[in-house]
Image (cartoon, rainbow, N blue to C red):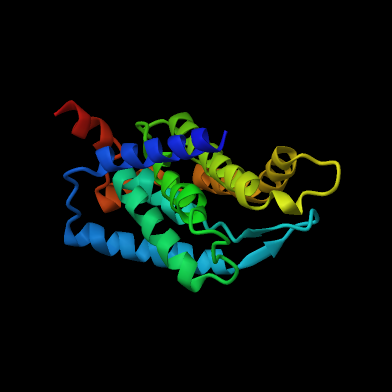
Amino acid sequence: MTILIYTIVALYFITCAIILKGNKPSLKEVCLIGIISAMALILRCIRVPLPTGSSIALLGVLPTMLLGIVYSPQLGIISGLITAMLSIILVPGYVPVHPLQIFVEHFPALSVLGFAGIFDCSKKYKMVLGSFISIALNVLFHTVSGVLFFSQYAPSGMGAWTYSITYNLSSHGVEGILAIFILTILPIKYLKKTLGGNTNVIRENFSR
């Protein structure tokens, strides 16, 4: 099972490398990535406690998802990777317990948020679908990390998978659902028009 998990994670990074191949952000895009990464870091530092005993960041996933939707998934992925790297240094309690946790959880869980804009977001349901997929993958990476690195904290009689799924659905899952709800009420079309974004960049790159 462990080998399978690491193989899937490796395939994810290969997919990201293919998507980002040849992508050279302009000065405007670099500035956008910096602003969004800073916003995500600030929000990730603000924790909201939950009745379950866990806590969620104050919509720390929202900026990266918004960048992926409004501008392009590539920029969202890059911003997620930068946010993950800086979170390890700047966000309290985000220090990995094992070096491999960085590659199993931190980098993939945050960069996958950029995939929220993988579909043509001209229709709201497509944006919601892309956002739901990115959040589902985000929770999945956190859950897998929980099984690999935090199973010792599972209560007696509770399996590692059950514990990790319950914990991450009640924290990262809740945060993701709230982020999707906020995205549905934001003026996405206006933001896309203002920033000049294109959510079909991935498709265009593959069709060349």
Q: Quadrant of the N terminus?
A: top right
Q: Is residue 70 left or right of residue 150?
A: left
Q: Quadrant of residue 206?
A: top left
Residue under the point 37% across and 35% down: 118
Q: Nearer the viewer, residue 151 or 60?
A: 151
Q: Is residue 74 above or below residue 57?
A: above
Instruction: Pick out the residue farthest to the left.
Output: 208
Q: Residue farthest to the top?
A: 207
Return the residue nearer the eye: 26 or 184: 26
Q: Position of residue 105 (x, y in %)?
A: 51, 50
Q: Nearer the viewer, residue 158 or 54?
A: 158
In this view, which residue lies farthest toward the right? 157
Q: Which quadrant holds residue 121?
A: top left
Quarter in which the C terminus is drawn: top left
Q: Position of residue 58 (x, y in %)?
A: 59, 61
Q: Nearer the viewer, residue 86 or 119?
A: 86
Image location of residue 173, percent across then percent down = 63, 44
At 67% from the left and 52% from the top, the residue drawn is 150
Is any part of residue 191 visible from this angle? no
Instruction: Classify residue 153 as left or right of residue 12.
Output: right
From this view, report whether residue 58 is shown above or below residue 151: below
x%, y% of residue 169? 67, 43
**How many badges with numbers are in the image?**
0
Q: Residue 91, can we see it?
A: yes
Q: Residue at x 67, y 51 (%)?
A: 171
Check the image and report above or below for 91 versus 12: below
Q: Quadrant of residue 205?
A: top left
